[in-house]
Image: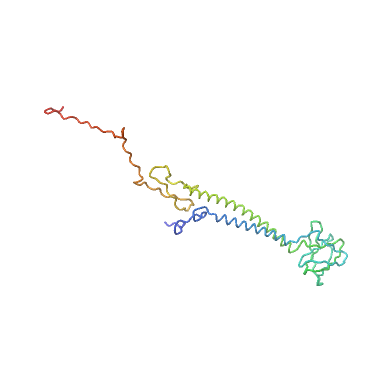
Amino acid sequence: MTMWNQPVSAPGGPTPPHAQDAAGLPSLKVPLVMTIAGAVTLAVGVCLFIAALRITPTVLPQNDVAVKHDGTAVVLVLLKDAEYGLYSSDTGISCEVFDPADKTLDVHPSRAKRRDGHPQVLGFRSTTAGSYTVSCDGNDKIIINRALLSPERTRGDAMLRASFLFGALGLITTAASAIWLALRRRRRARVVMSRLLGSPPPGVPAPYASPGSAPGYVPAPYAAYGPNGMVQPTAPAMPTTASSPQQSAPPQGGYGLAPQQVVYRPLPPPDGGQGA
């Protein structure tokens, strides 16, 4: 009956197991690829973390610039295409901002709170680098600084979360794969040493005959690897005429002479006599 699930051997010999290479040694391909993939993933996480720090604007208290809250215009030099925030404890302030071309910018509400307790009330985005005119009305002091809420900060926060995810995944994968690779190398070295010393690898049954066994049997060579991943020993060699044990020679007596066998025969009766 045809067995459709039998392994198919490649031309030229049986196919080695999946966990072994063409030489019959434990393969290092899979753990090596996993180690490299883990290291690359960890490197991606580190790069994302650095990029997140670079693109996320930092709101430093030493960069605060006071704006008069009585409606007096103040000229400030701002950066190009940057998000700025107006901070005040008075949440009802109103401000107008004019760019270097004397065009009014959109000032939108932006609720956020700094670590020092000053909330961000309003926000706007600059167009080009240059001098901007800012005028505000309120009941408490107003300061201007980089905005806490901005598209750059949103992208930076997303990249920061992704960097933690990639970093943790890469670190775990690299550590586990490195241990796996070290164990596979150790096993590979044991197999090589066992082949050099002529003993079967660990887990492989010993051949039918070994040195010191009955005369006429010789150690059988190992065949190719079978489907179960173990080295299959060949059938033992049958004893030959040349290797059969010799019959032992008869024991010899003293002085190197074999003992003589004496045969006693009765003498014939005398002439004319009757035998008894």
Q: Is residue 105 above or below residue 53?
A: below
Q: Locate residue 74, reporting x and y percent.
A: 85, 66
Image quarter of the C terminus: top left
- Residue 35's image quarter? bottom right
Q: Locate residue 175, reporting x and y percent.
A: 62, 52
Q: Locate residue 138, reporting x and y percent.
A: 86, 63
Q: Residue furthest left?
A: 272
Q: Is residue 214 above or below residue 120?
A: above
In this figure, what is the number of numbered marks?
0
Q: Locate residue 62, reporting x and y percent.
A: 81, 59
Front residue of this view, candidates 105 and 11 = 11
**Left or right of 241: which side holds 45?**
right
Front residue of this view, candidates 258 and 250 = 258
Image quarter of the N terminus: bottom left
Q: How is the image coloured?
A: rainbow
**Left or right of 158: which side holds 117?**
right
Q: Is residue 171 above or below residue 250?
A: below
Q: Residue furthest front?
A: 255
